[in-house]
Image: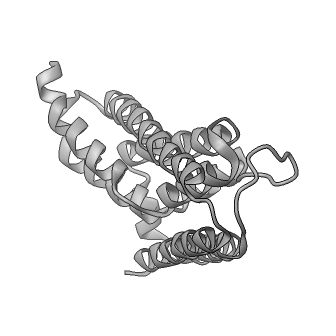
Amino acid sequence: MSPDQTLPLIAFAAVAMVTPGATTTLATASGAHFGFRRSLPFMIGVAIGLVGMAVAAAAGLAGLLLAMPSLELAMKLAGSVYLLWLAVKIGRSGPPHLNKSIARPTSFLGALWIQLQNPKGWAVTLAAAASFGELTRNAEELAALLGAVFGVLGLLSLMLWCVAGLLLARLLRHDWQWRILNIALALALAASILTMWR
């Protein structure tokens, strides 16, 4: 497999990862409220979750979810409740206090859970497995390729959104500006829940 053959996959994954969704919204909010360094466990958790999804998609785990609709429904319900709870927390938060150690960003395990029930992540990795399977000779190679591409590009995208949030924290000076941003981020996160139920 030549680098030229993987360019379409890289382009597909890059566009899919950088577009707004639940995890990019959370990365922006985390960067704004906690800074880049304290947001790293969240970003790494999401990226590792994305690697797991890509590997599972390449291995054909999607068939299990299709065969067990109750499992898919349970994941959607639990994920919706958790994301709604996070949206309320973001919407009610005030200006960031980047130097405080009291407030805590979403943990590594929390981020991993968010990503594993993220329908956008499943849709994108399943589509990639179906569309780019011919690039490799077997499921193991496809899993390694998809895992590497989605893991790296997912982490880079989250870092970009986190830095955007951090820049917002430096630009916004008044409480009313933060109220507007927090409500906007909370609404964007809540709206992303609707994509689970299409």
Quarter of the rendering containing residue 148 = top left
Against 194, residue 96 (above or below) is above
Residue 160: x, y in percent? 44, 42
Q: Residue furthest right?
A: 102
| Quarter of the C terminus within the rendering | bottom left
Residue 135: x, y in percent? 18, 31
Q: Is residue 47 left or right of residue 67?
A: right
Please, which colouring scheme is shown? one colour
- Counting labels gives 0
Q: Is residue 72 left or right of residue 42?
A: left
Quarter of the rendering containing residue 96 = bottom right
Q: Is residue 32 left or right of residue 196?
A: right
Quarter of the rendering containing residue 120 = bottom left
Q: Residue furthest left?
A: 4
Q: Residue furthest top?
A: 2
Q: Is residue 69 left or right of residue 11?
A: right
Residue 156: x, y in percent? 43, 36
The residue sitting at 50% across, 63% down in the picture is 22
The residue sitting at 64% across, 56% down in the picture is 113
| Quarter of the N terminus within the rendering | top left
125 or 177: nearer the viewer: 177
The residue sitting at 67% across, 40% down in the picture is 41
3 or 166: nearer the viewer: 166
Against 138, residue 186 (above or below) is below
108 or 179: nearer the viewer: 179
Against 163, residue 142 (above or below) is above
Q: Residue furthest front?
A: 173
Residue 133: x, y in percent? 22, 40
